[in-house]
Amino acid sequence: EADIYQTPRYLVIGTGKKITLECSQTMGHDKMYWYQQDPGMELHLIHYSYGVNSTEKGDLSSESTVSRIRTEHFPLTLESARPSHTSQYLCASSEFQRSSYNSPLHFGNGTRLTVT
Amino acid sequence: GNSVTQMEGPVTLSEEAFLTINCTYTATGYPSLFWYVQYPGEGLQLLLKATKADDKGSNKGFEATYRKETTSFHLEKGSVQVSDSAVYFCALSGGSQGNLIFGKGTKLSVKP
């Protein structure tokens, strides 16, 4: 049973719309992540957070923004969706340790976004 | 910087065949190594891990040994099942800001 939840699972939306992808976890994990997964399955880290009020940009530049007001919640927002944003978005969480080497990631089931 | 390279797919096998998915890495220090699996329509889940040289991670019949001399962490299973059809990701720790570095994924299809 998943301890990290993403909604919606599928979203089809028109160009220019504002959207928010939801992600919540019940494990009390401090660190959370957003990955973009392209059709070839490769993962790209676009945002992460160390905890409340912390947000960092990942390795891949993204037009999306994130917020972390509560430990359990890490939503991702696109102010104006475009067809190039069509992708699968995966949220994940992990325990935060100073040396995070042994901290596995727990993933949600993803949101598949299509922008028409 | 640290990096990981895994064999490109797709890999197609018959049921009960032997599986190897190659993964090699470059790293400074002593990273931990992981295999994640993504079943169709789902997120990734940890399959196994190894935290130091010569460690063997194992789970669900899959195994991988942390080989520092060959900088490898190849995934193996003696007899695959149709239910093993998924995408497999090799990963290592030690990315920027403590994040994991993922390989590009290898898609496995097992035919009955």
Image (cartoon, rainbow, N blue to C red):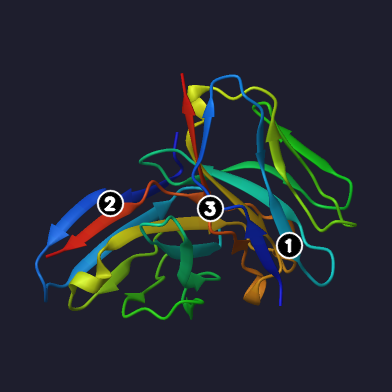
Q: Are marks 3 and 2 on the same chain?
A: no
Label 3 lies in what chain? B
Viewer-proximal residue among A13 and A84: A84
Q: Are marks 1 and 2 on the same chain?
A: no
Viewer-proximal residue among A98 and B26: B26
* Label at residue B57: none
Q: Which residue is mark 3?
A: B105
Q: Residue at x 58, y 46 (%)?
A: B36
Q: Which quadrant: the N terminus of chain A? A: top left
Helix, strand or loop status at disc 2: strand
Give the CA distance from mark 3 to mark 2.
Answer: 24 Å
Helix, strand or loop status at disc 1: strand
* Left or right of residue B69: residue A11: left
Q: Which residue is mark 1?
A: B25
What is the three-letter code of the residue carrying label 1? Tyr
* Left or right of residue A35: residue B105: right
